[in-house]
Image (cartoon, rainbow, N blue to C red):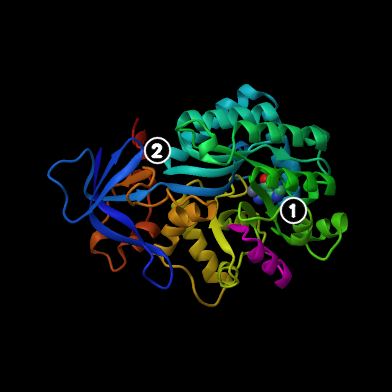
């Protein structure tokens, strides 16, 4: 397949990473980008065309599959929102058929906004997690999905025995391993060890989760330091010296660890996260919606921490990673005096930057041999003549522009179909 237009190519020459615009075309074959040609448009092509932007598919590094149906429950802070809205909604995943059908619907939504890869939470229910993994694999996305671990401080219907849910996670790790060479060809889905957060996990559960992640070299997903009352509760339940140390003691921090939020971190915590190579997942739309605070992205970057970007649906309300990236720019304006990312850096973050954070050097970018996960946009505004063309596309962004989403070389979504 040949896809032509203005390509968003990796730009690693500058002081900060970004994307650059270049007219040209891409040829894909068997799920990979086999040729990237800079220059004019070819005489014939299959998709795209003059005025089209060809972007890598977007990657969402923190979201909750069962929460797509609860977006917009406004006016509560995190702990009340979890009790009143989130847990009752997640309880519906006790029915595996419901979980399957919902995951399928969510994937439709993701493809329609150009998200081709994600790291997501399922629920405490084992069968539901299996169905979500099956569904993502069937639809061809690159994904990491974890069964949520909870053994305390939650309603009875959300509580599980620690030994039982660790055994279930281990069986998922055997069936959905992290290493691609251990999976069937074409299967781009793996599982993650997913202790929800320190409030709802006993020391024993977290330690068993850390051991399991180490044994399988697995991804870990959890939440860290999202809001102040959460910090107080963690200190009461688990002691000091700080929240990050609780996870560190349990052996949960590694370069495969995705720490959602990281709004309130002291010097020691930032040092621990940098030293272990763990990833801080910035979720700006969730932080504003739940009025939790604002992550200091620039400071974390300066401390040598890898920062990724996530929608955190449904604490976050925004499905399109373009708008989440825009919210990231805006959050940085408010939280820090200098260094707000450009549109180019923000676009990089939602694509190659997130791929790098996931340890995926072969997706999220338009380059030879990368996986052909792509988005084609046809903006109806004069972006090519703008002072900052990508800035115009990002800040004036309109979902109607997305004409196709390509997953692993196949058109997986086409506007109007
Ligand atoms: N902390 C623990 N669970 C959650 C969740 O589902 N959403 C958010 N935003 N924070 C959490
Ligand atoms: Zn979350």
Q: Quadrant of residue 345?
A: bottom left
Tell me if mark 2 has few (under 14), some (14-19) or many (20+) residues whose alpha carbon lies within 10 angstroms of its own: many
Q: Quadrant of residue 391?
A: bottom left
> Left of 416 or right of it: where is 154?
right
Q: Residue at x 69, y 58 (%)?
A: 226
Which quarter of the rendered picture does the N terminus lie within? top left
Q: Which of 120 and 70 is in front in this view?
A: 120
> Left of 298 or right of it: where is 40?
left
Q: Residue 251 carries which label?
A: 1
Q: Which residue is drawn at 53% across and 33% down?
A: 183
The secondary element bearing badge 2 is classed as strand
Q: Is residue 170 above or below residue 285?
A: above
Which quarter of the rendered picture does the C terminus lie within? top left
- The magenta segment: 264-281
Return the x and y of residue 329 as percentages of the image width and height: 49, 64
Q: Which of 10 and 293 is in front in this view?
A: 10
Q: In this view, does 37 lie above or below 167?
A: below
> Left of 387 or right of it: where is 252?
right
């Amino acid at each position: 397949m040949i896809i032509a237009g203005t390509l968003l190519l990796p730009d690693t020459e500058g002081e900060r990473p970004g994307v650059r615009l270049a007219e040209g075309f891409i040829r894909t074959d068997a799920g990979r980008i086999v040729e990237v040609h800079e220059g004019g448009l070819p005489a014939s092509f299959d998709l795209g065309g003059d005025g089209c932007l060809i972007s890598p598919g977007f990657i969402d590094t923190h979201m909750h599959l069962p929460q797509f149906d609860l977006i917009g429950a406004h006016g509560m802070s995190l702990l009340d929102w979890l009790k009143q809205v989130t847990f009752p909604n997640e309880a519906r995943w006790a029915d595996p058929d419901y979980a399957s059908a919902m995951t399928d619907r969510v994937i439709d939504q993701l493809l329609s906004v150009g998200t081709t890869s994600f790291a997501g939470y399922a629920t405490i229910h084992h069968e539901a997690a299996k169905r979500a993994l099956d569904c993502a694999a069937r639809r061809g996305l690159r994904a990491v999905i974890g069964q949520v671990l909870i053994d305390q401080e939650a309603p009875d219907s959300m509580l599980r025995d620690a030994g039982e849910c660790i055994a279930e996670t281990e069986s998922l790790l055997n069936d959905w391993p992290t290493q691609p060479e251990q999976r069937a060809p074409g299967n781009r889905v793996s599982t993650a060890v997913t202790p929800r957060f320190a409030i709802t996990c006993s020391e024993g559960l977290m330690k068993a989760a850390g051991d399991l992640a180490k044994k399988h070299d697995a991804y870990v997903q959890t939440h860290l330091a999202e809001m102040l009352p959460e910090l107080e509760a963690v200190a009461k339940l688990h002691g000091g010296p700080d929240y990050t140390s609780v996870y560190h003691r349990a052996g949960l921090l590694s370069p495969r660890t995705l720490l959602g939020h990281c709004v309130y971190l002291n010097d020691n915590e930032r040092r621990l996260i940098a030293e272990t190579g763990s990833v801080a997942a910035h979720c700006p739309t969730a932080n504003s919606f739940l009025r939790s605070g604002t992550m200091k992205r620039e400071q974390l970057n300066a401390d040598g921490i890898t920062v990724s970007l996530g929608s955190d649906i449904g604490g976050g309300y925004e499905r399109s990673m373009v708008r989440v990236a825009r919210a990231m720019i805006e959050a940085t304006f408010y939280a820090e005096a200098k260094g707000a990312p450009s549109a180019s850096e923000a676009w990089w973050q939602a694509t190659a930057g997130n791929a790098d954070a996931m340890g995926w050097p072969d997706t999220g970018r338009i380059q030879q041999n990368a996986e052909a996960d792509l988005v084609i946009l046809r903006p109806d505004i004069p972006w090519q003549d703008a002072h900052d063309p990508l800035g115009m596309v990002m800040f004036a962004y309109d979902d109607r522009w997305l004409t196709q989403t390509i997953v692993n070389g196949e058109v997986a979504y086409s506007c109007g179909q």
